[in-house]
Amino acid sequence: MPDVVRESVFNLQFPFTRSLGSTLSTFFSALAQGQIIGVRTAGRVIAPPLEYDPDTAADSGTDYVKVGPKGTVSTWTWVPEPTHLHTVKHPFAFAFITLDGADTPMIHVVDAVSESAMAPGMRVEATFKPAEERVGRIDDIVAFVPASDPSPSAGAGDSYVAPAENDITMLDSFCDLTYVDNTSASTLLWMESMLKGQIIGQVCPMCNRTYVGPRNMCCVDAIPLDESMIVSVPDRGVVTNFTIITPVQYPGQTETEPFVRVSILLEGTDAVMAQQSVLEIPASEVRVGMHVEAVWAPEAERNVDDIGNRGWGSGGDCILGWRPTGQPDEPAENVVERMM
Amino acid sequence: MARTENDIAIVGFAQGDMVRRSQKTETEMMLPVVAEAIASVGLTKSDIGFTVSGSCDYLSGQAFSFVSNVDAYGAWPPINESHVEMDGAWALYEAFVRLMQGDIDTALAAGVGKNSNSDASTLYTIEMDPYYLTPLGADPWSLAALQARALLDSGKATERDFAEVVSRNRANAKSNPKAQVSGDFDIDELLAADYIRNPLRRHDLPPTTDGCAAIILARGKKAYDLCERPAWITGIDHRIEAHLPTMRADITRSVSTALAAAGAGVKNGPIDVAEIYAPFSFQELIIREALELDASTEINPSGGALATNPVMVSGLIRMGEAANQIIKNGKRRTLAHATSGPCLQQNLVAVLEGDE
């Protein structure tokens, strides 16, 4: 039989697209062409450019200036073990680099042989991805490397005339984070009961409410509850609310047709099981007040992989869904004003 | 100075277990701490006029975790509640401002963070500038190290000074029962360790801590009803700097801390004890310079964030520790500092005073 899950790893991954606005569009469009630029505002050149001068909040304007590709390191650090989010996969430096023609530094990667090569005042120059691989992102510059010739960059400080329309106006990003959550004591109890094909609740000794899915706390009285307050509850109840969802095909959505999700108040309890699915009837026939009972997966097929902390009342892959019992409906006024 | 109905004080403080890996959810971590803070001043939950917490969904990886956390208040019938996606010190600031409206006389500010679910070396890349920094995987350890290197190169501090900060804080932490990392550390042995991010070594970084803390504030006469010696907040201010560390004129100085300190009236008298939230060892040196504290001020008797660092709670703990120096230890005037953002971007300073 499957066991409870004491620790679960999940990856939070999502793509998103940001609009760049005129200043950053100009910067990233130039970058994709292999040209780094800054903006001259209030007598200094900010590079990479910002739409505003952070000292005064004034509009930076459009007096763009060519900067780099060489620059000078001021401060630096060394990353001996890059993470999956770093763009260079071997040990490297991050540094403040003031590009020739600029008055403010930028942070970027310096690909040096070792940390002993790093020093303030070090001259570095940008290396770009091949033109066909550039997308208008800050890592179109692969890294800065020690400059073979420390002399000033040719053309740095010259005006840059922005095109009437920028090639690049959006930035595609991807969030990729990993979490390792440990299952709390109350959720472990719930997992065990689901695997056994039983629904348990917890009774608050102060208000006498029965929660479905133990929480080890009463969220009305703000007191801890314990295992002595666990009770068995029936796997039969009444639909108190429902919604019909027309699925949007976002990543991870497996439903393709409109489907129903219901809240169910089990007999003798005070907190509904939310987000439950209904079997055997079309979504259009689901009603508030309808009596339903749990349809359990065969014991050998049950698992609790999808049950996590705070998912009180989630049946995981143990409860397949709920089917109508055929009893006459409960009057709707008997099932309103129940807790989520 | 006689207190008026416009004066607001910290009257109660509770903190839960501070551990590397809690087996509890954030809500479960909050429940006993909130209850202890309220009970410590003889109140019940229905007596609290305003409740506000600081936490961050990205830490535990749970969307709307702060909504679940409301369960820890017993928020039925509905309560007057708010939340900041910041350290609990900023929740306390909101509670302070709310109390100034004058229609309520008690408030609860909490902070909670289940830090162990995520990885600090990758998580915080998403709080950086999304155009110029996040795509490079620019992480807070690297950014702090860039600031540390600049401090060394300025001649204002040495790596030995960094290690001295670590050694002193973790020695102080021996007397803090909530400390996660404490003990006697030899400075030469610390300096023999490898760099995590040159010039920072493992000990220059804060520990990863799961934890929760809560503070009760009271206004005017109510403070004396709840506490024999309230810690009056005579000044509180917070200031923020440019998000890109490269846009600050001098990254070895904390202009925002200096401005907040002036706003909070730090110089109106001597400071007996200062609790400074410096997540990285060397940042304590930058903050101390900005606060212009003299040698008579005791720094971080709790051990600070190098001993215990539940992100979203550490700043609020500084508030509670600074308050307890007045409430329990009879100190006259103390200071609490909190920080947020890369390279000490945002800083909050509060001055607390006990009656003469």
Image (cartoon, coloured by chain):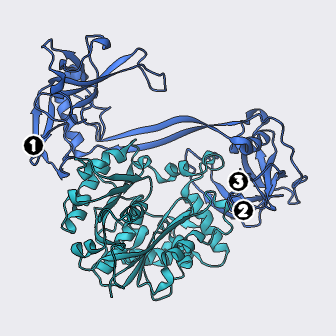
Chain colours: A blue, B cyan
Q: Position of residue B44 (x, y in %)?
A: 19, 60
Q: Residue at x 56, y 76 (%)?
A: B290
Question: Label 1 crowding class (10 Å Cα cut-off): few <14, some 14-19, many 20+?
Answer: few
Q: Position of residue A96 (x, y in %)?
A: 70, 60
Q: Residue at x 69, y 67 (%)?
A: B249
Direction from residue A141 to residue B196 in the image, left or right: left
* Relative height, residue B233 to residue A72 (above, below): below
**Mark 1 — on which chain does it sit?**
A
Q: CA distance from mark 3 to mark 2?
A: 35 Å
- Which residue is the site of mark 2? A117
Indicate the quadrant containing the N terminus of chain B: top left, top right, bottom left or bottom right.
bottom left
Sequence-first disc among 2 and 1: 2
Q: Position of residue A3 (x, y in %)?
A: 24, 33
Type of the residue with mark 3: Tyr
Sequence-first disc among 3 and 2: 3
Residue toward you, B223 or B339? B223
Residue toward you, B61 or A18? A18
Question: SS for tag 3?
Answer: loop
Question: Label 3 crowding class (10 Å Cα cut-off): few <14, some 14-19, many 20+?
Answer: some
Q: Position of residue B40 (x, y in %)?
A: 21, 68
Q: Is residue B349 visible?
A: no
**Mark 2 — on which chain does it sit?**
A
Residue toward you, B124 or A304? B124
From the image, state whether disc 3 or disc 2 is nearer to you.
Answer: 3
- Which residue is the site of mark 3? A52
Numbered tag placed on residue A208 in the rendering: 1
Q: Residue at x 54, y 77 (%)?
A: B262
Type of the residue with mark 2: Ala
Question: Label 2 crowding class (10 Å Cα cut-off): few <14, some 14-19, many 20+?
Answer: few
